Image (cartoon, helix red, strand yellow):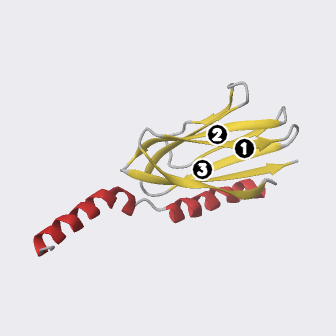
Amino acid sequence: MFNSNSIRVVTTLIVLATANTVFADVRVARDRSYEIAQSSRKRGYFMTPTGIQGHIGQGEYYQVNLEVKKGLDYCILVGGDANAKDVDLYVFDELNNVWKHDERDDKDAGVEHSANYTGILKVYVHMKRANGLASFSVLAGRRG
């Protein structure tokens, strides 16, 4: 049936196949997003978890849609884990115009803006630089 060599080979393949995801930690990214949200809370934003989190590799994007209402201020934050070296955030309106962006060389990203319409924002998390797979977590807040 199975000898010890075939079991070792299968075990090695499983370890290699999951090696990139072993160190990507959504919990760390989520904790980081809550840490960076503290200053937004102090400025009157009601921050809520979006449930949007995951793993993406270097150069990959993750797209999210968020509802906005005219006249309210919005804050969108992304926290990264230790593998995330540079996370960028791009926010587009329904006409594909850039609403706001954060391209700082940082493992976190965030934008604030007042909505001039009621509708949907397209939010793109871009993992510009990462060590293997990296985790991210998105928080959104509003005030007004």
The residue at which mark 1 appears reads as 66
Q: Amino acid at mark 2?
A: Val
Mark number, residue 78: 3
Provide residue 79's location: percent of width, then percent of height: 57, 53
Q: Identify whether 22 is placed above or below 125.
A: below
The answer for how far apart the CA atoms under marks 1 and 2 are is: 7 Å
State which mark lies toward you, 3 or 2. 2
The answer to which image quadrant residue 112 occupies is top right
The answer for how far apart the CA atoms under marks 3 and 1 are is: 14 Å
Q: Pick whichever, 142 or 92, lies toward us.
A: 92
Provide residue 32's location: percent of width, then percent of height: 57, 60
Badge 3 crowding class, 10 Å Cα cut-off, few under 14, some 14 to 19, many 20 or more, is: many
Q: Amino acid at mark 1?
A: Leu
Provide residue 20's location: percent of width, then percent of height: 35, 56
In the rendered structure, are the residues bearing label 3 and label 1 in contact, judged by CB atoms less than 8 Å apart? no
The answer to which image quadrant residue 39 occupies is bottom right
Q: Amino acid at mark 3?
A: Val
SS assignment at label 3? strand
Q: Identify whether 47 is placed above or below 62.
A: below
The answer to which image quadrant residue 88 occupies is top right
Provide residue 14's location: percent of width, then percent of height: 28, 63
Q: Is residue 27 left or right of residue 1?
A: right
